[in-house]
Amino acid sequence: MEKFLIAGGRRLQGQIRISGAKNAVLALAPATLLAPGIHRLGNVPRLRDVMTMIELLEALGCTCRLEGRELLIDTRSISSLRAPQEIVSRMRASFYVLGPLVARYGYAEVSLPGGCAWGPRPVDLHLTGLQQLGATIEVRDGYVIASATRLRGTRIELRVSSVGATGNILMAAALADGETILHNAAMEPEIVQLGEYLRSMGAHIEGLGTPTLRIVGVSELRPASVEVIPDRIEAATFLIAVAATEGEVTLTDACADHLTAVLEALEAAGCSITTTASSITLRMETLPRPHPISTAPYPGFPTDVQAQWTAFMLRAPGTCRITDTIYPDRFQHIPELQRLGARLERQGNSVLVHGGYPLVGTRVVSRDLRASAALIIAGLIAEGWTEVIDIHHIDRGYEAIETKLQALGAAIHRVVQGD
Ligand code: EPZ
């Protein structure tokens, strides 16, 4: 096990490159199962979750080769239609293989993903969507058993604009007979890129980036190549970390258009921001103003940035409310931030932040990916040394986070976690 040692109080400044988006790769890689051949994904980040996805695809019989940031996936010899619990329980996005396997092979056994650090993560919308497309769904011994002779297009309305359910239904409908209309579809950039990738494979999809998708199924798809979009959550995390230290940063290979809600919040808190087609520059010269946020599906403020914003608001003298309308229990970071001296009041699906009080470094525990990012941000602004332990969570979703922070002048070191 490893931990981070962070000395707070340094002003971060400089330039770093944003990596490819984890949540785009985790949707694009399963999509390759829809077409036999060699697929190429470029700008793939080196993350634990990417390695887990590769492990899953290889368990299904794919041959994968990751060289630098290029991932080649050969789907010509699928030999298993079973996604084992041992892998799915480590990474919920494994569930994305369900739709493609049922669509192409008419059968799949995928372990239920179980919960995560902040509560249950249901998949009912995935299953009802596939049932509406004609799949027979059975749940046995913790596995979803899905079978279908031929999927048929239909009209589906999502109760919640679920990213994962949109992805699974989109991939399945691409090979179904006839037309599918999907209402209340997710509009996240990662889902838009999934749709664009499917179109480059020969799928007929309209409405990407809007709440209504129209898919006309085809009999077969062909392998294709794609460059993964920049990771908007990584970009948001670094912008907030630099703003919290009253620093200055330019993010290259970043896409400002995917971050409008976060950029607006940063400007409201007092940051000055300039952007180009492929970069974002932030400058912060004062303490931030308190600015409340409430998460929402894209293009709203991302739930994956809620914990980081909470850490940032600890610097803002005054009080503000941070609400998570997507995951009402995504507050694992609160008790750990309180160990640093943070004054936070949990109230249902929101937290009241009393900012402007000093934080003092101590040992804190990383519980999940984005909560860990919040702890690192808090460590950067706390007095003295902060230890963040159990950092394997962080490596799931951030490529060499300490190296990028060191490039901005942070005193952060990865060490073996002794005791
Ligand atoms: C994706 O998860 C992301 N993961 C998550 O990022 C992100 O937090 C989430 O979308 C919301 O933006 C990937 O893309 C791999 P959802 P997903 O289905 O697809 C409810 C990270 O940190 N729901 O959009 O699992 C659900 O409970 C990760 O990178 C159902 O009720 O999220 C939640 O309240 C964490 N039934 C809401 O919908 C379902 O069948 C949104 O969930 C599915 C979801």
Image (cartoon, grey):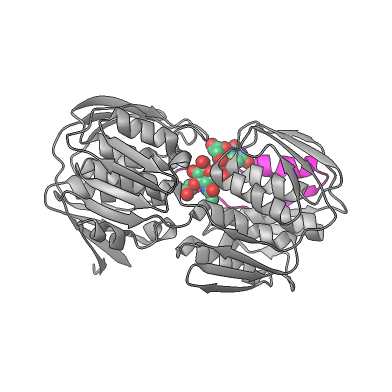
Which residues fall within the magenta stretch?
112-141
Q: Is residue 157 magenta?
A: no
Task: Look at 24% across and 56% down and name the residue there.
Answer: 408
Whole-percent x, y for residue 312 in the image: 27, 38
Figure check: 141 above or below 312? below
Whole-percent x, y for residue 119 in the image: 48, 42
* Image-quadrant location for residue 287: top left
Task: Look at 60% across and 53% down and name the residue there.
Answer: 27
Figure check: 82 above or below 67? above
How many numbered circles does the render carry?
0
* Image-quadrant location for residue 320: top left
The image quadrant where one finds the C terminus is bottom left
Q: Relative to residue 65, is residue 355 drawn left or right? A: left
Q: Quadrant of ligand 1?
A: top right
| Residue 141 showing in the rendered view | no
Figure check: 153 above or below 386? above
Whole-percent x, y for residue 224 in the image: 68, 62
Q: Relative to residue 131, is residue 318 drawn left or right? A: left
Figure check: 16 above or below 309? below
Q: Relative to residue 299, is residue 112 drawn left or right? A: right
Q: Is residue 136 magenta?
A: yes
| Residue 186 showing in the rendered view | yes
Task: Look at 22% across and 51% down and name the residue there.
Answer: 13
